[in-house]
Image (tube, rainbow, N blue to C red):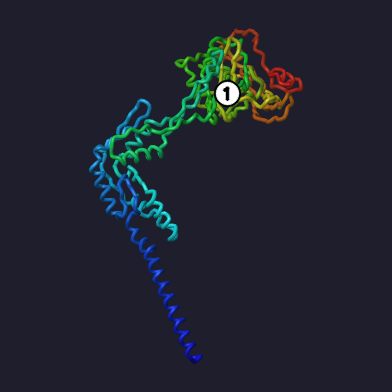
Amino acid sequence: MSKEKTKTENRKKTSVLWLIAVCIIAVSLLLFCQFYFGDAVNSKTTFYSNTHINGVDVSGMTKEEASSVLSQKLADNKDNIEIKLKNDDKEWTLKGSDFEIVGNFDEPLDNVINYGREGNIFQKKKIENKIKNEGLYVNIPYQNMLGGIDEKIENIIQEVEKVPQEAKICFNPNSTNMFTLQEGENGVKVDRIALEQEINEALENYDSYVINIPFQEIMPENDMSLMLKEIKLRARFSTNYAKSSNDRKNNIKKALSAFDGMVVEPEQEVSFNKTTGPRTSANGYKTAKIIFNGSYISGVGGGVCQASTTLYNALLRADVDVLQVNHHSLPASYVPLSFDAMVSEGYSDLIFKNNLETPIYIKSYGTDEEAIVEIYGQPLEEGVEIKTRAELVKVLPHGGDKIITDEEGKYADKVLYKGEYYRLKYPQEGYESKGYIQYYKDGKLIKEKEIRHDYYIAQQGVIVQGSASLEDGMTLPASNVKYISPQKVTKQTTENAKKKFNII
């Protein structure tokens, strides 16, 4: 055989072998694609084998077929549904006959039929085999089956759930043990996920079922027993009114009683005028001396400013924020300059705010001699004490006396004729003063800040003389009213003022 013929035959054999190999590969690929892709395509519209929905075997069904079967089963068995929900001694019944069929199966059926269809061929096949061997069991939520059942269940949950009640600190300022603890109560929170799961499982059988509502107890957030132990006296302040009239003492005690037992929450603002209410006779206030336009006159509620001043100074020492305070036209005798707090309805108020993170508690009362305010709450920093300091900047001299004639006869019982005098008011010197709050740590001054700068304007004296002319032959006796000239401020004047107000 020639070499050329041998080569030709070898080429023919090689071509045949390649052709056979290509055919084998093509057939294998065709079978492979038919096995995997064909199966996957077919199964995209049908459920995997061994798939169960609401107790119905939907293996090989399309979504439409499964929906029809499930709807029919729900319609046939709806009236048999009776689920009892229990919580302690309460019980609620969910009857299928009370609800309308919704049959909203599209979305949940889509979720089931598409389960395991993601990923590559091998992952899909792995999930499919697992379902065939172990089964896939799914419950369609009751909200997609029965209309209105979710609202009914939510109403039941609202009856069961209970917000935890915090323990409460009770404040009784007139008791030996002023602070006591009223125990709180645990709350109840329904486990909604577990409850829905149990209801869905119950609906699978379309029969009577009893469910004890799953819940967990919720503890109150704060341990009030610890807070109770931390309540301490932050500040105490008193002023003396031993020489006051009984009516004035009544008014001071009346105003203080409005604050006695008050609990002020964090960030809460308090108005003195709103708290005490109208200073009227109907409200229990009596007539006593008040300061008005630089003079002492009689008025209902006289003395209330001593109550507000006592409270104000206690608040300062407790380091509580004072938002509004005003001074009198005349200095108060019961506190240093720049530490009075004048109140008047519609005109001047004392307003403060609890700037602490916990409540403050006020005890305020009056004895026969003193007005007293105590502020309780979280203690000041250990070793810290708060004090106040008044500074007399200067004395403002008065302008002496002025003489006015009683043309209207208002003082006819005192004076009638010209040259006959009656002192209506003494001149009073005024003061410029400052108030400071001081912070001490272990007895050492660590900080001082100015909180007040006031002017108590000097008051001119007033002498009244009669308006009638003397008749012939009349002589007036010598007057015992002495005219006072304008004041000249000296070093001694300033020293006397400091002693008067106990200013060092």
Q: Horizontally, is 462 left or right of 383 in the view?
A: left
Find residue 261 and report its horizontal and vertical position in percent.
53, 19
Farthest residue to the left: give it.
Answer: 76
Q: Horizontally, is 386 left or right of 184 in the view?
A: right
Question: Is residue 396 something one can see in this rendering?
Answer: no
Quadrant in the rendering for residue 310: top right
Q: Is residue 498 above or below residue 145?
A: above
Q: Tag 1, which secondary structure?
A: loop
Judging depth in this view, the residue of 163 and 87 nearest the camera is 87
Residue at point 26% right, 47% down? 71
Quadrant in the rendering for residue 324: top right
Question: Is residue 306 something one can see in this rendering?
Answer: yes
Q: Is residue 67 above or below residue 215?
A: below
Q: Which residue is mark 1?
A: 342
Mark 1: few/some/many CA within 10 Å (<14, 14-19, 20+): many
Quadrant in the rendering for residue 452: top right
